[in-house]
Image (cartoon, grey):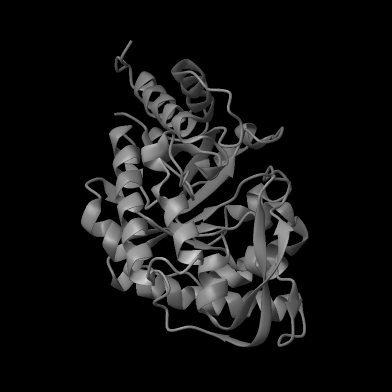
Amino acid sequence: MTIKTTVIGAYPKIGDGPDAQELRRALHRRDRGEITDAELRKVFDDVTRATIGEIEAAGVDTVNDGQVRWDDLLAPFARSWSGVEQGPLERFYDNNTYYRQPVITGPITTDGQSLVRDYAFAKGVATARLKAGVPGPLTFATLTARDDQYRSIEERTLAAADAIAKEIAGLAAAGARLIDIEDPAVVAAPKYIELAREAYARLADAGHALALVTYFFPPDAVLESLASFPVGVIGIDVRSRDTTAFDRLDAFRTQHILLGVVDARNTRLETADEVARYAERALKLVPQERLVLATTTSLEYLPRDVARAKLTALVEGARLVAGEKVPA
């Protein structure tokens, strides 16, 4: 049985040649008032369709929509939630990319439909298993620039969790059965691990599988705690920094492990053999049916041709573990 593979987060929005620059041109034209929102939406749809096609062509088992419409991890909700506005630009952790910090101006409320249209479109395109994604409550709370409503980070995190729970319910009603919750703050700020656990208790629902996806930082300080979170999948980045996680994966008795083995922030291309070795190391402590191989984080940090090559290495590495031949 071949180990399953998946992607995390955003895919590069701009392609390699002039024909793949359509989205950049469309955004500039919209800024100048030369096209309508509907026309820009069609371009987003076209790029999303092409993105899903590229991910599927690599042989990835579970795909997403590439988050083509997302300016950054927090943007979809910072734009759509009542009581939240997009604020100043800030560096996104230790990356050379930036995001708009949320500014909370009042009670956070949502109808839970922020991502439903986008998921429904992707569902009509994808032929592989499709998953959805949302930002995590602790990441949203810790990356907020200003909060005029809630008196503490605890209140802010739980308010974000309640809103995210509504978004998850909306996605589930639209057919999403697997939803990534991208929450790097859980490992970036381990002092809040108990607060994070409380927040995730508000997200749990037996109707769909939730994946707590961490990245950028090792889970070492909170690994055993993560094993008690009410989610079906835990995502762990084992490439960005040194980690003891490989020797402690048996802490996860029932959860699936989404193992980030392809470095999505480094243009160096892994070989299939290298990916297979990471998988074989993990298999010493995790049954094959509970192991999923993935990129460490969003591939948007890379040129699109490199992203495609990394997905090929990911899939071929998974096949090597099963003893399948890979193309020369």
For this view, does 318 lie left or right of residue 183? left
The x, y position of residue 78, in whole percent, is 57, 73
Q: How many marks?
A: 0
The x, y position of residue 297, in whole percent, is 55, 44
Identify the residue at image location x=41%, y=50%.
Answer: 66
Q: Is residue 49 visible?
A: yes
Q: Is residue 154 above or below residue 73?
A: below
Quadrant placement of the C terminus: top left
The x, y position of residue 147, in whole percent, is 73, 80
Using the image as rendered, state which of residue 74 and residue 27 is in the foreground.
27
Identify the residue at image location x=46%, y=21%.
Answer: 276
Identify the residue at image location x=52%, y=34%.
Answer: 303
Return the residue found at the far top.
Answer: 328
Using the image as rendered, state which of residue 289 and residue 101 is in the foreground.
101
Q: Is residue 319 above or below residue 185?
A: above
For this view, does 94 lie left or right of residue 171? right
Identify the residue at image location x=58%, y=23%.
Answer: 268
